[in-house]
Image (cartoon, coloured by chain):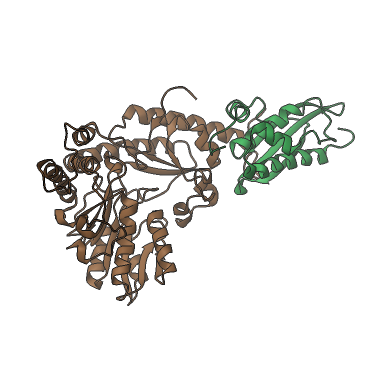
Amino acid sequence: MEALDYSRFVLERFDRPPNAGRLLGRVVRGSAGEAAHGTRVEFDFRLRAGQVEDARFRAYGCPHAIAAASWVAESAAGRSLTETSWMDPMELAAMMELPDHKLGVLLVVEDALRDASGHAGPAD
Amino acid sequence: MTNKKPIYLDYAATTPVDERVAKAMCECMTRDGVFANPASSSHQPGRDARGRVEAARRDVAALVGACPTEIIWTSGATESDNLALKGIAHRYGNRGRHIVTSRTEHKAILDSCQQLETEGFEISYVTPGADGRITADLVADATRDDTLLVSIMHVNNEIGVAADITEIGQLCHEEALLFHVDAAQSAGKLPIDVESMHIDLMSVSGHKIYGPKGVGALYVRGQPKNRLEPLIHGGGHEWGMRSGTLATHQVVGMGEAFRIARQEMESEANALAKLRKRLWHGLVGLGGVFLNGCPDHCAPGILNVSFDGVEGESLLFALRDLAVSSGSACTSASNEASYVLRALGRSDQLAQSSIRFSMGRYTTIDEVERALQIVTDKVNRLRGLAPAPRGDDAHERAG
């Protein structure tokens, strides 16, 4: 795939990410990456009875980073944060038609999810 | 993304062929036109073609104050740059093996210098000031007793900054150094006079000023035959400096483009300066926008800016209703942010998030206004998606 030639998956989530922004109040946050290095991702999760009731993301990065963060925030709904294996970077890369050299972007997104998972206590 | 054609703001990359140029070119292709080989002096059609080629040579020479016999046709500015540097180095390498150029030159110069380094030449790369300008003082500091050649571009292709060519030319003249200028971005945009600027060699291109792609020229002071070692052999065309049958239609097109530029350059430059000013003032209103370059010494149609708080690849993709260039690594084969902006001291983030807007003959104020609206919308949207700078939540938006 050439530069600036993105899959529909990426294009739609880049143009119209349904869950961008932040949640106020009592939420579990996770973050990873550095803007200075090209990618930073932050998640807010609101939990109810141990399951994600609502999620938002913020992302500084390439279109793939924004699309991946958006997908994770959307896909987390109804799941427990203590288990994050559903976010498989290789499977997501295939869905996104991600160029090989961009895999590191998905690892930042995964790290942000894991960071949130680490902050989610048993009571959450 | 709409289905409308993007607004073309990439005139520094290339320009559309002017209709007047296309008409002149079409006269030199089909059997009812001037199609013969201009080297075929034994018959009238050949002499007619030669006449058109020489008229074009006069038009190119006239724009820069040269004699027609000092113009060699090439395939473009890249070949001209190669011929200038390697041709001089190979002819005069016994006089000196040191060359001065700058870190912000076009790759045609930098890669040619790199090649000459493998042949034993030493190259000094001048670093511009923060405004991107190469001055005579910077060049003077880099020259040595064994300096053979100074090669500095007139207008930088990425940031549009004009080097102090007159002063550098004076320096080279006084120090008896050969002076080459890559004028691909300035010919037809800014006044050039090879005599008063003491330029010994100069590269120009057809397609940057509404001529065809695939043709350029090299100005060589005096008799080209005695000044350069050719790169291409075979037939002795162009005084033996550049063999190969001349592409009459390309050459004629370039000549016509230079003729038009000579007539219209001043009024066009004034119009472009106004469009550039409007674009810059509109962009500044966004906040976190940085000018890459020098506002007082620049080509009239080029504006390069960096946007704080947005990632370069996303910015370029978001701006796909505009045809613009980016300093982002995603558009370069090297996977590195613009080496020109890095040489100016820009951070990697700001180099990545730079956009070059370059306007030209057909750009309208309506297009500039629409481009401003698009940039404003997209930059604000991307900034809204991004996390707040670390330790500052104030700008995050509520979900």
Does residue B131 show up?
Answer: no
Q: How many marks?
A: 0
**Towards the viewer: B381 or B335:** B335
Residue drawn at 60 percent across, 45 percent down: A38
Which chain is green in the picture?
A: A
Q: Residue at the far left: name it.
A: B44
Residue B192 percent across, percent down from the top left: 21, 52
Image height of B142 relative to B357, above or below: below
- Residue B372, horizontal then vertical, whole percent: 42, 31
Q: Quadrant of the N terminus of chain A?
A: top right
Which of the 4 image quadrants contains residue B97?
bottom left
Q: Residue furthest bottom?
A: B145
Q: Quadrant of the C terminus of chain A?
A: top right
In depth, the one of B332 and B73 nearer the eye is B73
Please, is residue B237 above or below residue B388 in the view?
below
Q: Quadrant of residue A5?
A: top right
Toward the right, the furthest residue is: A122
Whether residue B83 is visible, yes or no, is yes
* Residue B272, horizontal then vertical, whole percent: 29, 38
Give the chain letter for brown. Answer: B
Q: Residue farthest to the top?
A: B3
Residue at image position (33%, 76%) is B146
- Looking at the image, which is closer to me, B229 or B389? B229
Quadrant housing residue B280: top left
Q: Nearer the viewer, residue A56 or B224?
A: B224
In x, y percent, where is residue B345?
48, 56
In the image, taking residue A109 as reference, residue B229 lies left or right, namely: left
Q: Is residue B153 left or right of residue B266?
A: right
